[in-house]
Image (cartoon, rainbow, N blue to C red):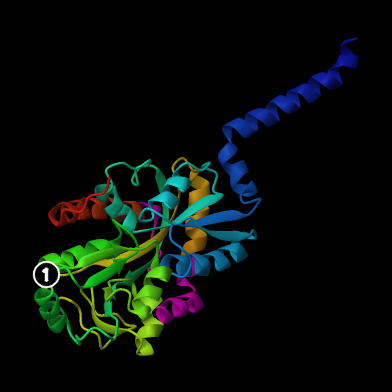
Amino acid sequence: MNRSKSPPRRIAMVRTLVVASLLTGGGACWAQAWPSKSISLIVPFPAGGTTDVLARAVGVELAKSLGQPVVVESKPGAGATLGADFVSKAKPDGYTLLMGAVHHTIATSVYKKLGYDFQTSFAPVSTVALVPNVLVVNPGVPANSVKELLALAKAQPGKLTYGSNGNGTGQHLIGAQFEGMGGVQMLHVPYKGSGPLTTDLLGGQINMSFDTVTPVLAHIKAGKLRALAVTTAKRSAALPDVPTLDEAGLKGFNMGTWFGVLAPAATPADVVTRLNTEIVKIINNPEFRKKMDDIGAVPVGDTPAQMAAQIKDDTERFAKLVKDAKVSIE
């Protein structure tokens, strides 16, 4: 009788050992299984802007290296916070990612109520690129320099308009700081993203913008928009003849926009590590770096810890700027 029951006991023991192995060594097992299906990369802006362009560039190469489709999805609205909120509440399994940006560190101070905390609700993966912002005006604006633009704005308080990617975004804050340092008053017009913003700028519905270089570069080269200055401390390699705002008279002006990939908090560490490894490889590929040069982006590719430190520093730095500029949204 005992011998006849021996095989079932062995089977039961094997099953127990397998289950125990999965429970105690799950990290290694899941690392081998991931990814087993398509990955969603959420862009919190409409198609056509820098965030979208970078997400698609990374997504194409990431799909090749992981062997699974990477689907770029736009979830715009509320200054990029709607898309971020969606990802923060997604299952932390590595299949829903966010193409985040510096805007999210600003929104922390601008929006009084957010459904997430950008520093604790996400697991940073890697910064993809830094893109300078550029002050561009519609050719119909009678100003060929920052000095002339400031004089025009002072002569017409509150009449000149500047567009942004939404309330609380980097472009909004740059515009507010430009007003403060330049001693002028302009009208802020928020959009959901660079696509509709650029369309209205080209059509003359708004006078200017402080958008990133990427969506306006071709229009600048074609003479459809006039670049007056870049907002970073150094000139942009894509626009070497365009001065910085610091050079144009607004001393100490230095703001740019970084973009990077984040996962929901509690995403397994091995999945985050795998994502970081693959993304950094992509960023260091000469062909990818050439693509970044072509759109005016500076490739980065850092560690999760370095990205987390950048987010912390920016959140603290922008909190003061937001307070000084008196930018607040319910």
Q: Is residue 167 above or below residue 151?
A: above
User: Which one is nearer the viewer's eye here, 89 or 142?
Assistant: 142
**Residue 172 horizontal/vertical position (percent):** 26, 62
Q: Is residue 270 above or below residue 126?
A: above
Which residue sits at x=21%, y=55%?
318
Q: Main secondary structure of the magenta part?
A: helix
**Residue 12 horizontal/vertical position (percent):** 77, 22
- Quadrant for the N terminus in the image: top right
- Quadrant for the C terminus in the image: top left
Q: Quadrant of residue 3?
A: top right
**Residue 293 horizontal/vertical position (percent):** 40, 80
User: Which one is nearer the viewer's eye here, 45 or 3?
Assistant: 45
Left or right: residue 128 compared with residue 179: right
Where disc 1 sits, the SS reads loop
Q: Of the residues shown, which amino acid type is indicated by label 1?
A: Val
Which residue sits at x=43%, y=81%?
294
